[in-house]
Amino acid sequence: MSDSFHYQGGRNKMKKAINQRTLAVIPCYNEEATIGSIILKARQYVNEILVVDDGSIDDTARIAKNGGAIVISNKSNKGKSSSIKTGFKYALVNGFDYVITLDGDGQHNPDEIPVVLGNLLNNGYDISIGLRAGKNTEMPKWRRVGKRVLDYATSFGNGGYVTDSQCGFRAFNKKAVNSLIDKLNGSAFSIESEELIKAHELGLGVAHTNITCKYKNLDTSTKDSASHGISVLSYVIWLIAEKRPLLFIGVPGFFMVLIGLFFGIETLQHYNETHVFPLSYAILVCIFLIIGVLAMFIGLMLNVLPNIIRRAKEK
C-alpha cells in the first residue's frame, strides 16, 4: 500500500471526479472566521459543498450560504459524528459518487482535495485518509502523542493497520458511504476511528495520503484535547471489546480470578499462622473473585450470543 499519492495533472484529471459528481461535506461549529475561504477554495474541485452547521451561534451559516454552499443547520449542537452522517445521507439522496470531508476551522487545505481524492479515482480504493505526518504538519508534540495513542488503539479494531485515525480530511466513494452510513453509531469525535474500524469489518479498501496541516492561531475546538482524547479512546475500547469480548473482557476477568485466588491463599495462610482473620484481605479477595467471575461470564456470553442470534435469524 502506498503511503502517498503524487497528484499530477491539476484540474484536468479532476474532470473525472466532476463528471461523477463530488460533494464536499464540512461540519462546522462557530467557524465564521474560516468557513468563507474554505468554501472559496473547495468549490474549485467539487460539484457541490454542504456545510452542516451544528448549532453555531455566530455567522457561520450566513457566510456559508453567501459563499455558495448548501447549509443544513441543527438547532442544537449534536456533535461531529451526527454532522458527518447528515452529510452522508445528503450525498446518497442526491446521487453523489464521491464525498470529501474536511474540517471547517482552517486546519485542512482544500487545494489538496485532488490529492486525497486521487486514491479513489486512480488507485481503486474505497476510502482515502489524510495523513498528518512529517515536516508538512504544524501539529504540536503533545497532540502527536495523543494522536498516536488513538492511532494504535484504533489499529486493534481495524486489522492492525496504523494510520492517522483522527484526521477528518477524507474521501469516500459511493460504495463506502452506502456501506458505512447504517454502521456508524458513535457520537461526537469518535466518528473517525469508528469509520476505520467499520471499514475493516466491511472489507473496504483504505489508503492514506500525506497532507499538510495548520494548527497555528487555530483555537476553534469545542472540547479541550484531553476530554476529546478520553472520549474517543473510551468509545474505541468499547467497539473493540464488543468485537472481541473474550479477549477484552473474559481474559482480564480470568486474571482477576487468579489474583483473587492468590490473595485468598495468602489470607488462609495468615489465619493459620496467627489465628487472626485479616478482614481487609478477605474483602479484597471477594471483590476480585466476584468481578473476575462476572467478567468471564459476560465475555463468554457476548462471544456466544451473536452466533445464537444469527442462527435464529437464519431459521
Image (cartoon, rainbow, N blue to C red):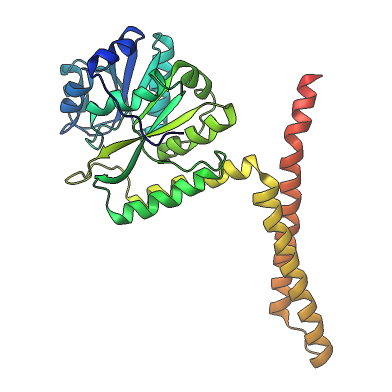
Q: Is residue 12 above or below residue 184?
A: above
Q: Is 160 situated left or right of 100 in this image? A: right
Q: Tell me where residue 259 appears, x and y as whole percent.
A: 72, 69
Relative height, residue 126 to residue 283 (above, below): above
The tally of labels here is 0
| Location of residue 130 in the rendering, given as x and y in whole percent from the top left corner | 35, 34
| Residue at screen point 70% across, 65% down | 288
Task: Judge whether residue 235 can be spotted in this image.
Answer: no
Task: Determine the residue positioned at 45% across, 45% down.
Answer: 232
Relative placement, left or right, of 34 versus 291 is left
Residue that appears at 41% across and 50% down: 148
Would residue 311 appear left or right of 170 to someone viewing this image? right
Q: Is residue 199 visible?
A: yes
Q: In which quarter of the image is residue 37?
A: top left
**Res 83 quadrant in image:** top left
Which percent across, then down, holds residue 272? Answer: 84, 88
Image quarter in which the C terminus is found:
top right
The image shows residue 58 at horizontal and vertical percentages of 19, 32
The residue most toward the bottom is 274
